[in-house]
Amino acid sequence: MPRHDIEVADRLEYLSILDEDGRLDQPLEPQLSDDELKALYRAMLLGRRFDERMLDLQRQGRIGTFPPIKGQEASQIGAVFNLRPEDWFVPAFRETAAEIWRGRPLDSFLLYFNGYNEGAILPDHHKDLPIAIPVGSQVLHAAGLAWAASYRRTDEVVMTFFGDGATSQGDFHEGLNMAAVYQLPLIAVCQNNQWAISVPVEKQTHTPTLAQKAHAYGMPGIRVDGNDVLAVYAAAKEAVERARSGGGPTLIECVTYRLMMHTTADDPRRYRSEEEVDQWQRRDPIPRFAKYLLGKGTVGEALLEDIGNQVMQEIQAAVERAEERMKELGDPLDMFDHLYAEMPSSLRTQRSELERDVAAGDKEVSHG
């Protein structure tokens, strides 16, 4: 038989509603109430200010290293804003703003980044997974949760986040392929912040977009301006509704930028230019959205200032709570708890030995 073409559906959209100069594509403007718009702004601002405060604390030696989110607030809040409490949220490790929106207390971050496992404990009623440090591994967890929701015939959806670097991992491909084969209610949000630590996105893939990888699995994919919270919201809303109604998974590529370092142990000046950072700084999602809200008449300058003050008070209260609680934490015997419903004899023996050693050490210290 001679060669012949195979028709492949490969339509790919790019969505931007509010550009960096504050110009609005009015026909695409989501129908959000004033309260919802103010909630979006407050959530992004809280994520930004908390991020900045944690950087100050880290530089003062009051917390350990952590991954800043500055510049990526719209990609996170615009997406999770569409979830119900009964839906599943599966983060990577740079989703602080989204985790806060889902109800994680601010002080738990400070405990966690100080090395206290208590900071990783999530409330029982939350359908959120802890952060995933191994790159891309959480995509498999999300696919499993989506499989369970499909098997149980609930209307839950699962939203997972990952960076551009995760798309080079096998976990990403396995998870998305499974979601597409079984038409699972999974929304996969890629925060393409241009850098996988020090590797630029153009050295990670030969394709001009990451969203088009959805076509290989036979699922919808869309590329959005990740610094435009309205565009992210609209794309995620469509994906959530499709998943909830049985229409299967979606890959959303949010084109954004990590304005700060990969983690506070990293020096980004060694691999990227200040000119590049300045260019993306002009696309900052928060001033852009504030300009939109002011122009729309949803808020005034006085209300924006009031929101900013409220956010800083909330952050300060969390810092004080965390530092007070840390005075009571750190008992090494805690490492034996929460592993088994019934502790095996080998661990009981080890715990007893450590308890004696700790007591002996405390006695030695008290006697000088």
Image (cartoon, rainbow, N blue to C red):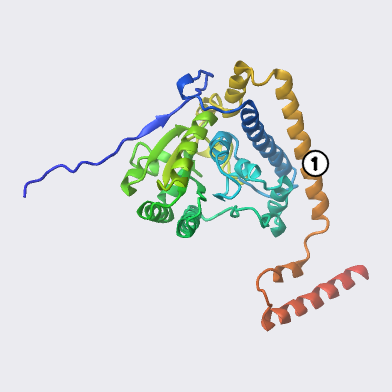
Q: Is residue 145 placed above or below 286 in the rendered structure?
A: below
| Image side of residue 326 versus residue 256, left or right | right
Residue 323, given in percent of the width and then of the height, sits at 80, 49
Task: Give the residue at x 69% y 35%.
Answer: 49
Tell me which corner region of the image, top left, top right, bottom left or bottom right, holds residue 239.
top left
Which is more toward the observer, 18 or 321? 18
Residue 256, given in percent of the width and then of the height, sits at 50, 34
| Count of labels in the image | 1
Q: Is residue 44 placed above or below 116 in the rendered structure?
A: above
Secondary element under disc 1, as helix, strand or loop, is helix
Direction right: furthest residue: 367
Label 1: how many residues lie within 10 Å, few (<14), some (14-19) or many (20+)? few
Residue 52, given in percent of the width and then of the height, sits at 68, 36
* Amino acid beneath label 1: Ala
| Image side of residue 64 versus residue 223, left or right | right
- Check disc 1 and report the residue beneath it: 317
Does residue 13 show up?
yes
Which is more toward the observer, 246 or 356? 246
Which is more toward the observer, 302 or 52? 302
Residue 182, given in percent of the width and then of the height, sits at 38, 55
- Quadrant where the C terminus sits is bottom right
